[in-house]
Image (tube, helix red, strand yellow):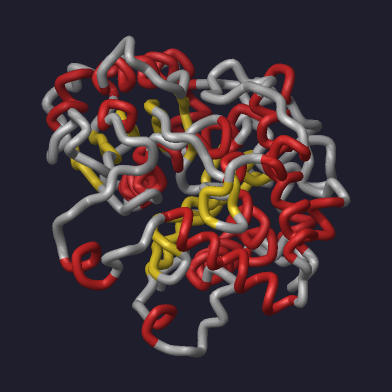
Amino acid sequence: MASGIRDKVAILGMGCSRFGERWDCGPDELMLEAFNEALGDAGVASNRIEAAWLGVCLEENNVGKTAGPLAQALRLPRIAATRVENACATGTEALRGAAYAVAAGAYDIVLALGVEKLKDTGYGGLPARTRGVQNDLWLPNATAPGAFAQLASAYAAKHGVAMKDLKRAMAHVSVKSHANAALNPKAHLRNAITEEDVLKAATIAAPLGLYDCCGVSDGAACAILTTPEIAKSLKPGAEIVTIKALEVSVSNGEEQAFSAWDGAHIATAREAAARAYAAAGVTDPRRDIHMAEVHDCFSITETVLMEDLGFSPPGRAIHDVLDGVFDRDGALPVQPDGGLKCFGHPIGASGLRMVYEVYQQLLGRAGERQLGRIDRGLTHNLGGHPHQNVCAVAIVGRAGA
């Protein structure tokens, strides 16, 4: 009988590169930047790592189709290394592979690392692939801003929300992310903005404007995982952070094939969250989760996810947003590091970057953006469009919490 991975896997160390337009380095330097921090944090030598998972979404971006670049850049000792990809949820997918391996007892100490060098493409948004059935036949004209703009329109229609009110809530989300990122030295976009800046910005895909869209960045993030017992032996007396749940849900196509889906929510987010809550013993998400990092590729996505993740009742997310519930000093802080919107979105690294922030907050290392004491945090990673996607939800917290 499956029992999940609750408290079976500890995070021994984590690292994250600075995100941004990193013309100064290639993916190997980004991987090293994150890895060296994680190795120092873990307090182990690299030859203690027994297996590794590399998350890269677009192998065209100077990284390749195998895990070879990871093994070579980090000079790993000829261990098993696997490259994984699951759209924008790639970083969490790498973490899942590593965590499940430890929980299964296959290895004692493992590495999960995600990296992406998006700026090298010279493209203003996420690069558009031109091969494969999904892109050539199913979604021939879809763009990310266009697809998520439809999510906004559907949400407004379903809940009877005036578009001007929804746009105000979306603007608050963006202003919040910029304010938080201004306190984060590793964030890509650290400029403060105002609600007026957001509302007057150029339209990208109505109702989404320029400031409603996340940045395109280079970066890497990683985690070194082990068992709680080994973590305690290596770090006697230290606070141990464990994984409570890590669940993934992939769309089976119903959202785009049938009329039952209302277009106003992310079905896979609800499914992955429900499984994660059951595995972690969370019965009231708004009470039991103390901070969250969600896949805010667009401001509307974060807004809608507050309901999909159970943080707000149906139709109430915009009111909670405007009331400051999810601000850094609110009841449930969301994106205290700036999120995808401002920390940046190097696809393969994003899921691990989210866990990195929760880990830092749990250990009291977040500097100026440090929250009060938290015991559990949630990360949500989304890949694809609202009507066809993969969602990953992880819950991490203090050992025993």
Note whether 98 is above or below 163 in the view shown: above
Residue drawn 36% across the image and 62% down it: 142
Point 17% across, 37% down: residue = 60
| Up-down relation of residue 193 to residue 106 (above or below) | above
Q: Which of 38/334 is in front?
A: 334
Q: Residue furthest bottom?
A: 259
> Whole-percent x and y of residue 292?
65, 46
Q: Is residue 22 left or right of residue 240?
A: left
* Res 125 quadrant in image: top left
Q: Is residue 357 visible?
A: yes
Q: Quadrant of residue 54?
A: top left
Q: How many marks?
A: 0
Q: Residue furthest top?
A: 24
x and y, in percent, of residue 52 in the image: 25, 35
Residue 386's spot in the image, x, y percent?
47, 66
Q: Residue at x 46, y 63 (%)?
A: 147
Q: What residue sits 31% from the left and 22% below the top? A: 31
- Work out which residue is located at the far right of the displayed protein and give it: 323
Q: Is residue 27 left or right of residue 156?
A: left
Residue 50: give x, y in percent of width and height.
24, 31
Q: Is residue 112 at least partly visible in the picture?
A: no
State the residue in front, 360 or 130: 130
Residue 81, quarter of picture = top left
* Left-right relation of 316 to 109: right
Observer-nearest of 82 and 21: 21
- Quadrant for the N terminus, please: bottom left
